[in-house]
Amino acid sequence: MTAVEQYRRDFATYMSLPGAERCRLQMYPRLEDKTASTPLDAYYFRQDTWAFKRIVDLKPSSIVDVGSTALLVGILAQMFPTTSIDIRPIPVSLPGLTCRQGSITNLPFKDASVELLSSLCVIEHIGLGRYGDKLDPLGSIKACKEISRVLKPGGHFIMSTQVSHTPALCFNAHRIFTQAQVLDMLPAFSVTDEAFFFPRPGNAEDIEALTGFRFCFWCVDLVKESA
């Protein structure tokens, strides 16, 4: 039986049942939702839940987020005062959340003024034009320099990006870094916590088994070292 045939049968059965609504009716078929499990993007589900727990454990007085998912930003704002910076600002009004248009390569904050900055699955996109930003092969490097500028000594950078054993460019979607490349872009930082999602949880050694343009989401809490 096709999905359309099943829809017609379900409708006829429903309307024959006691209590079926006799009101304005619109046929609004949803034919792809009868799945064995709830669909989700496993990469984003795991990285966002990891980041939320890490930030809650750190108990910051405030958060600056650059470009993470709107849902994560909104939930964080219910826990901590949160400023969201995005070239495509989130079009919502929510207690605890301030949304501002801005670029990760030119953040509207003074030097060493931010306690905690989160930016999940962002730096690999900078400079590729995907989201309306200016084309710039050095975009990721400039983003990391700007993050380093605004974070306080001892401040936390909660980030994720796509890594493999070999760098790659998937234009205009994203870059794939090595872990060493990321750390080279953030020389003033040290790793305090990390997780690897393939999208199932794994470890750094599993990166060597990746093939083609497959990647791992490397989620990492980096702390800016004191001068």
Image (cartoon, rainbow, N blue to C red):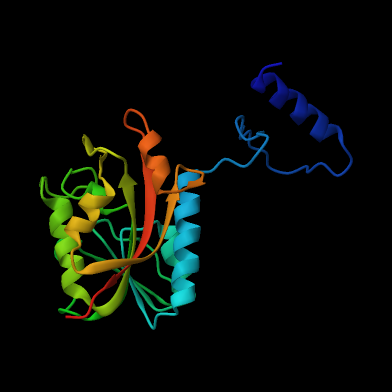
| Residue at the image position 47 percent from the left and 43 percent from the top | 199
How many numbered discs sit on the rendered protein? 0
**In the orientation shown, which residue stands out farthest toward the right?**
18
Q: Nearer the viewer, residue 46 or 97?
A: 46
| Residue at the image position 29 percent from the left and 77 percent from the top | 155
The answer to which quarter of the image holds residue 177 is top left
Q: Is residue 9 above or below residue 84?
A: above
Residue 73 image offset from top left, x and y in percent: 41, 65
| Residue at the image position 65 percent from the left and 39 percent from the top | 37
Asked whether residue 103 is in view, the answer is: no
Q: Nearer the viewer, residue 40 or 2?
A: 40
Q: Is residue 198 above or below residue 2?
A: below
Left-right relation of 205 to 114? right
Asked whether residue 39 is in view, the answer is: yes
Residue 91 image offset from top left, x and y in percent: 35, 61
**In the orientation shown, which residue stands out farthest toward the bottom?**
61
Q: Nearer the viewer, residue 195 or 106?
A: 195
**In the orientation shown, which residue stands out farthest toward the top?**
1
Please identify the quadrant where the C terminus is shown.
Answer: bottom left
The answer to which quarter of the image holds residue 209 is top left
Residue 54 image offset from top left, x and y in percent: 46, 68
Left-right relation of 111 to 95? left
Left-right relation of 73 to 121? right
Q: Is residue 111 above or below residue 34?
A: below
Please identify the quadrant where the N terminus is shown.
Answer: top right
Residue 109 image offset from top left, x and y in percent: 19, 76
The answer to which quarter of the image holds residue 14 is top right
